[in-house]
């Protein structure tokens, strides 16, 4: 046993080297964000004198935008799960006509470029007064999360044994009662996966942020970063601090909800 | 909504001889079942169906900022498409889109495959390392673009600093500011972004290959490269097809990375169909032209979607 472990050590070392290369940009983001000389042009390899000045600046400039992003992301999660969970159940368990057609529409919808949707939504939103609004962004961001969530949830719900639901139905529960009291609790894990990814999709959204907002009143943090990038950058530290702050949800999810994230990474593509 | 009516009407007609009560209960049942699906169907209609139709309509109109005030968008027939295709920029964007897509996919796939095979040998910490590898995929694309723009900065970016320090290059490389290099830089960044996705899906596919097949192949003398050629690759083919097609479709619509890194420049060196469509609609405010370009993009995507669906069906059938 001990021998195989030592023989496998080179692989571990090599794996760490690969990972270090892949994650170097993330390290560099954090490293730069902690260094704030007057110009911060020449960052050192490690933050020898870490300072949070850049974060202070980033927060003072982007806190409102992060609040907008958070509201949009949470709203997208709620809206997505409300729409996708019953739909996934129907597609998995009911023998309805046009189920094949709905599935086809879902698969195709994942292929439609966001810019196509944004192009048409801009004019519609302009008429409806949904430009520069959080509900407008939630509805638009759900174009990414709803098809994904339905496919993930359906894949799981197909595996729920019919007897489980039928038992409740025999006891007189309607479809909705059976859905709420049996299907939703049993599907908890895949609902969490769908919710986490809906959050990340909406939090990271750029296409709809850049097209469906035109003023600074409702501006997601992704657009805040983009605004930095389009200007002449004097100091990279606040930009990197903002990018680091915008990366927090992804890092938290990966560390604390790794099981669900891994499930989503696999399920979203293959199913 | 019409779907519910149709379903109810369909059952009513299909079973005229059934007792009335059973018939009514059946249609109530149908409506209850469709109610689960209705919100999703309505949403898909409004947020996918409508935009696609609207885009097609707009592409035949002279749709500009003026339209928002006057409400008039005169029909222009194929004029938008003609002007798009005749523009010298079109061939540039088409070539860029092709190079960006092919370059990204080849890089992501080869490195992703190598990593998947590497992680297949279980070793201490392999699980932790593999899950941390997902991080670049989960970060907001625009945040990653910002970091890479800083890393690739010509004067003070760490990449040039390192290359100069190691004497790999005599002068700082203008990664994002030279029309000759910018597209390569953007492709490299996109490869970095796609590696985790490719590695994860391919790793999942590798897990599905029965160990006995390798043992049997080893008895026949097939190990190493031969085992990959005769056991791994044939078994992995369905997963590979899905990864490649999804990769193409996702890469075709990339906007964040290019806008964040170069904005389509310098001198349109990184302008793709997606960024050009954005530029026409939301920078120049010529929505008709933007719609025409994005329709061309949709057609290309749909070709690959059809391929994907056929592969998917075959995978399900097997």
Image (cartoon, coloured by chain):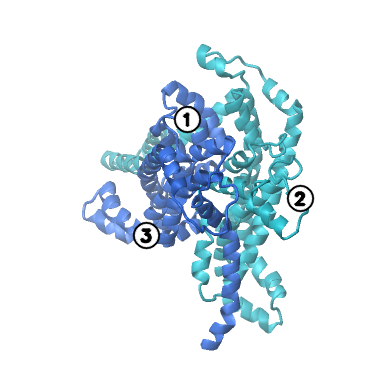
- How far across and how far down the image is residue B91, in percent? 76, 34
* Mark toward the viewer: 1 or 2: 2
Question: On residue B221, which mark appears?
Answer: none
* Mark toward the viewer: 2 or 3: 2
- Indicate the chain on which mark 3 is placed: A
Direction top: furthest residue: B70
Label 3: few (<14), some (14–19) or many (≥20) C-alpha neighbours in 10 Å: some
Gap between marks 2 and 3, in whole Å? Answer: 62 Å
Q: Is residue A147 visible?
A: no
Residue B295 vs residue B171: left or right?
left
Chain letter corresponding to the colour blue: A
**Quadrant in the picture for residue B64:** top right
According to the image, label 3 marks what residue?
A: A160
Gap between marks 1 and 2, in whole Å? Answer: 41 Å
Name the tint of chain B in the rendering.
cyan
Residue A150 vs residue B59: left or right?
left
SS of the residue under disc 1: loop
Judging depth in this view, the residue of A116 and A64 nearest the camera is A64
- How far across and how far down the image is residue A201, in percent? 47, 46
According to the image, label 1 marks what residue?
A: A213
SS of the residue under disc 2: loop
Q: Residue at x 53, y 71 (%)?
A: B126
Residue B125 vs residue B288: left or right?
left
- How far across and how far down the image is residue B10, in percent? 41, 37
Q: Residue at x 67, y 60 (%)?
A: B110
Which comes before the other along the chain, label 3 or label 1? Answer: 3
According to the image, label 2 marks what residue?
A: B171
Q: Residue at x 46, y 42 (%)?
A: A98
Judging depth in this view, the residue of A157 and B15 nearest the camera is A157
Q: Residue at x 37, y 48 (%)?
A: A85
Residue A196 vs residue A106: left or right?
left
């Amino acid at each position: 046993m001990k021998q195989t472990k030592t023989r496998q050590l080179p692989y571990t070392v090599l794996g760490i080297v690969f990972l270090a290369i892949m994650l170097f940009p993330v390290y560099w983001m954090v490293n730069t964000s902690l260094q704030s000389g007057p110009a911060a042009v020449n960052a050192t390899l490690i933050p020898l004198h870490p300072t949070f000045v850049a974060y202070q600046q980033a927060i003072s400039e982007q806190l409102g935008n992060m609040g907008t992003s958070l509201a949009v992301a949470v709203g997208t999660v709620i809206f997505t799960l409300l729409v996708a969970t019953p739909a996934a159940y129907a597609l998995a368990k009911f023998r309805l006509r046009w189920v094949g057609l709905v599935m086809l529409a879902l698969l195709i919808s994942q292929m439609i470029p966001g810019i196509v949707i944004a192009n048409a939504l801009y004019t519609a939103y302009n008429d409806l007064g949904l430009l520069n609004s959080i509900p407008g962004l939630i509805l638009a961001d759900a174009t990414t999360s709803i098809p994904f969530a339905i496919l993930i949830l359906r894949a799981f719900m197909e595996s729920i044994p019919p007897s489980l639901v039928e038992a409740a139905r025999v006891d007189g529960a309607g479809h909705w009662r059976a859905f709420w009291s049996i299907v939703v609790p049993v599907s908890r894990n895949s609902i969490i996966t769908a919710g986490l990814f809906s959050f990340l999709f909406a939090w990271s959204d750029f296409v709809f942020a850049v097209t469906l907002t035109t003023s600074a009143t409702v501006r997601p943090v992704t657009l805040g970063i983009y605004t930095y990038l389009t200007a002449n950058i004097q100091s990279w530290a606040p930009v990197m601090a903002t990018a680091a702050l915008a990366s927090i949800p992804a890092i938290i999810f990966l560390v604390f909800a790794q099981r669900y994230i891994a499930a989503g990474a696999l399920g979203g593509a293959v199913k | 909504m019409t779907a519910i009516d149709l379903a109810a009407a369909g059952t009513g007609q299909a079973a005229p001889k059934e007792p009335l009560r059973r018939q009514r209960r059946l249609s109530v049942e149908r409506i209850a079942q469709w109610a689960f699906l209705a919100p999703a169907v309505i949403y898909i209609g409004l947020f996918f169906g409508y935009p696609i139709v609207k885009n097609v309509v707009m592409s035949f109109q002279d749709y500009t900022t003026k339209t928002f005030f006057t409400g008039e968008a005169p029909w222009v027939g194929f004029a938008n498409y003609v002007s798009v295709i005749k523009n010298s920029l079109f061939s540039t964007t088409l070539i860029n889109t092709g190079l960006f897509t092919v370059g990204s996919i080849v890089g992501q796939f080869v490195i992703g495959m190598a990593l998947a095979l590497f992680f297949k040998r279980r070793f201490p910490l392999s699980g932790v390392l593999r899950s941390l590898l997902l991080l670049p995929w989960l970060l907001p694309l625009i945040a990653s673009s910002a970091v890479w723009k800083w890393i690739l900065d010509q004067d003070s970016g760490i990449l040039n600093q390192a290359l100069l320090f190691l004497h790999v290059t005599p002068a700082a490389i203008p990664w994002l500011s030279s029309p000759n290099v910018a597209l390569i830089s953007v492709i490299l960044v996109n490869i970095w972004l796609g590696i985790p996705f490719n590695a994860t899906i391919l790793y999942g596919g590798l897990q599905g290959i029965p160990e006995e097949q390798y043992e049997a192949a080893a008895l026949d003398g097939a190990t190493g490269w031969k085992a990959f050629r005769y056991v791994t690759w044939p078994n992995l083919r369905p997963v590979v097809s899905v990864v490649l097609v999804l990769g193409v479709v996702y890469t075709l619509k990339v906007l964040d990375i290019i806008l964040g890194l170069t904005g389509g420049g310098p001198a349109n060196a990184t302008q793709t169909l997606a960024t050009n469509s954005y530029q026409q609609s939301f920078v120049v405010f010529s929505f008709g032209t933007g719609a025409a370009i994005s329709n061309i993009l949709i057609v290309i995507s749909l070709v690959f979607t059809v391929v994907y669906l056929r592969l998917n069906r075959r995978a399900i059938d097997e």
